[in-house]
Every structure is written in structure tokens, then in C-alpha cells.
Image (cartoon, grey):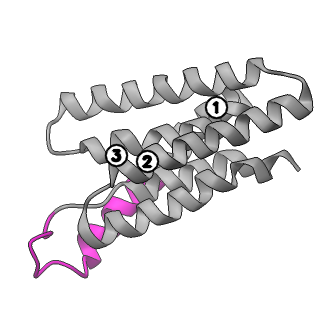
Amino acid sequence: MPYLYCLPSLICAVALSVEDIRRRRVPRVWVAVFSVIQLVADLVWAGMANQFFIVLQALLFALLCAFVQLLLALVKPGALGLGDVTAMLPLGLAVGMYGLESVIVWWVAMSLFGLAWVMFWTRFDPQRHTEYRGRTPFVPAIAVGAIAAVLI
């Protein structure tokens, strides 16, 4: 059951999604702590499987995904925030363990769910009368995509 080693990222995804929905912010401290915990879980899994390349692979995929997300945020300012970029790190450490195919599935699932999520949120925004009006939280789409990639 190697997917149990993704539990720190699952907890992180839920916590960051709730915080992003409630306050439109992603605490960097949470991201840092969960990234370290997920990295330790990756090391434990790699040690048990005697495949330490998995840790390097997970690190590189996490950094690559965060960098691509950063480029997307810079292309259209305001569409994605720095919180969305940093949320990619702990989730990328979990999905990256499973290889390139899982990362591709993650991006496809994140895109499809993100599109549906943005359409749903703009239609039924429960915070349309607050200061968060017009801002869609995207961390839940990132989280659901990561969960789908790990399960598939």
C-alpha cells in the first residue's frame, strides 16, 4: 500500500483547501512543514523499496510543477496566486513518486476539475458579498487532481 505514504500530502491538501476557500490564502509555514513531512515519508518509502531514485524524482517533479505553475501565474497576473504555486510543492512530492505518467494525469485532472470548479464557484459563490468576491480558490482543484493522480 504505497499510497499510504501520500497521507501527509492528503492532510496538507485538505487543510490548504479549507484555508484557501475560507480566507484566500495559503500559509507558507504549512506548506513548508508538510513538504518536509512528505519528503520524510518519501525517504521511508524509498528506503523500504530500496529505490532512492524515487526521492530525487519526486523532488524534481515537485519543483518542475511549481515552476510551471509560477510561469502560468506570471503569464496572466491575478489568475493564480503565489499560494497556488507553493501548494504544488507538497502535493508534487507525493504525485512525483509515481512518475511522469502520474504527473501528467495530475495536470489533466487538475485542469478538468479546475475548469468545472471555476464555473461552479463563479455561479454559486457563497462569499459574493464579502471582500473575496470574484476570486476563485484554486487549491481545491490542485488537491483533487493530485488525489485522482495517486488513486489512478
The residue that appears at 20% across and 28% down in the rendered structure is: 75
Asked if residue 131 lies left or right of residue 117, the reply is left
Q: Are marks 2 and 1 in contact (CB under 8 Å)?
A: no
Residue 120, image x, y percentages: 34, 69
Write the residue at 32% across / 55% down: 26
Q: Element under label 1?
A: helix
Q: Position of residue 144 (x, y in %)?
A: 54, 57
The amino acid beneath tag 1 is Gly
Range drawn in magenta: 113-134
The x, y position of residue 34, in whole percent, is 53, 49
Numbered mark located on residue 50 in the image: none
Whether residue 40 sits left or right of residue 113 in the image: it is right
Q: Residue at x 15, y 44 (%)?
A: 78
Write down the residue under mark 3.
84
Q: Which mark is residue 31?
A: 2
Q: Residue sitting at 32 percent across and 60 percent down?
A: 118
Quarter-wise, where is residue 104 in the image?
Answer: top right
72 or 9, nearer to the observer = 9
Whole-angstrom CA distance, mark 2 to mark 1, is: 16 Å
| For marks 1 and 3 on the same chain, the one whose residue lies earlier in the sequence | 3
Residue, disc 1: 96
Q: Is residue 129 above or below residue 40?
A: below
Tag 1–tag 3 contact (CB < 8 Å): no
> For residue 135, which quarter of the picture?
bottom left
